[in-house]
Amino acid sequence: MVFYRTRNKILQKYLEGYYFLDEDEHLNTIRYKTFPNNYSIVSVSRNAEAHYDNGKIMISTSAVQKMNTDIFLRYTEPIEVVYEKAIDEITFYFKPLGIHHFISESNFTLVHKRLMNFTIFPDFNEKMFKIFDLNDREEQIEAIENYWLSKLQVKDFSLMEKLLFEIETSDLKIDEIAQKLQFSRQYINKLFLKHIGKSPTEYRKIHRFRNVIKQVKEVKNLREVTLDNLFYDQSHFHKDFKGFTKSSPSSFFKNVDTQKENVWLFI
């Protein structure tokens, strides 16, 4: 599956990119593990059913024509994804805060309670059916980006952007960041849960984890990467890494192709 980075300059601030999966009756079961990240992931599938249970998503074909939309904001352990067979699917990766510029705050609150089979816009399913019916990938990409542009409502998240910057780049503890910005720790935690869907501590750990994966593409020395990402020591690094992958760093990097945009472990 090819990951397409967002082409429209305006959308690039909010949407990292997307990938397509095409229905194929000759393709056998697809099974892989995906690992925690800080994106808001919106997955749209045609004529499919998705069921989530105990860290596993099972996707099967539907007996009736329908559109299924699932949103994932918060997971701190690997999720196993199993397709009975290849289906028509488009999965979007929204940057932190990005999805807020397209859906209302009340809808985002609902996402916390209902991740599977979620309706984003009244015309969303109809538009997605038309996009899936296009035979040319370039036409699909143009239609997708034009549609998201039509829904864009730029909002002011300057405070959250400042908090994200501190969390991502500073070696200060969360309490120290709160004190620096003259907020309580509880207030910052509330803001993160409201706008990001996870706590600031979870966000920071996942950010460091993903940075390590990116940097290992070019730097082979894990110790060097560990220090660059503000881990206290190797023990701290291994503990966080094992929590997110359920494997050691050496085993993970041996079995996962970090050169690809989608860092999955096929099983």
Image (spheres, rainbow, N blue to C red):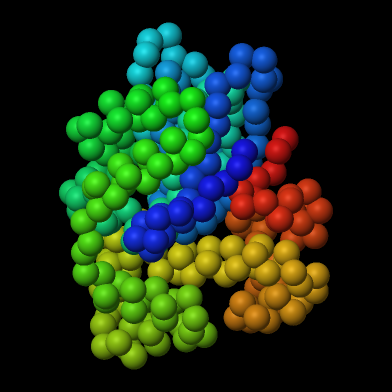
Q: Name the residue located 24 percent from the left edge and 47 percent from the top edge.
A: 151
Along the viewing direction, whichever of 235 and 214 lies nearer the viewer: 214
Position of 221 with respect to 30 (left or right) is right
Q: Is residue 120 above or below residue 202?
A: above
Along the viewing direction, whichever of 138 and 32 lies nearer the viewer: 138
**Residue 249 picture location, percent across and down:** 74, 61
Position of 100 with respect to 171 (left or right) is left
Q: In what quadrant of the picture does the C terminus appear? A: top right
Q: Name the residue located 34 percent from the left edge and 90 percent from the top edge.
A: 180
Q: Is residue 23 above or below residue 107?
A: above
Q: Is residue 117 visible?
A: no
Position of 48 with respect to 266 (left or right) is left
Q: Name the residue located 76 percent from the left edge and 77 percent from the top edge.
A: 223
Quarter assignment of residue 24: top right
Number of residue marks:
0
Q: Is residue 266 visible?
A: yes
Along the viewing direction, whichever of 48 and 178 lies nearer the viewer: 48
Q: Is residue 72 above or below residue 57?
A: below
Quarter assignment of residue 8: bottom left
Q: In what quadrant of the picture does the N terminus appear? A: top right
Quarter assignment of residue 95: bottom left
**Residue 111 picture location, percent across and down:** 30, 44
Q: Name the residue located 44 percent from the left edge and 35 percent from the top edge.
A: 140
What is the residue that sits farthest to the top in this orientation?
Answer: 63
**Residue 184 picture location, percent across and down:** 27, 80
What is the residue that sits farthest to the bottom in this orientation?
Answer: 180
**Residue 9 picture location, percent across and down:** 39, 61
Along the viewing direction, whichever of 72 and 45 lies nearer the viewer: 45
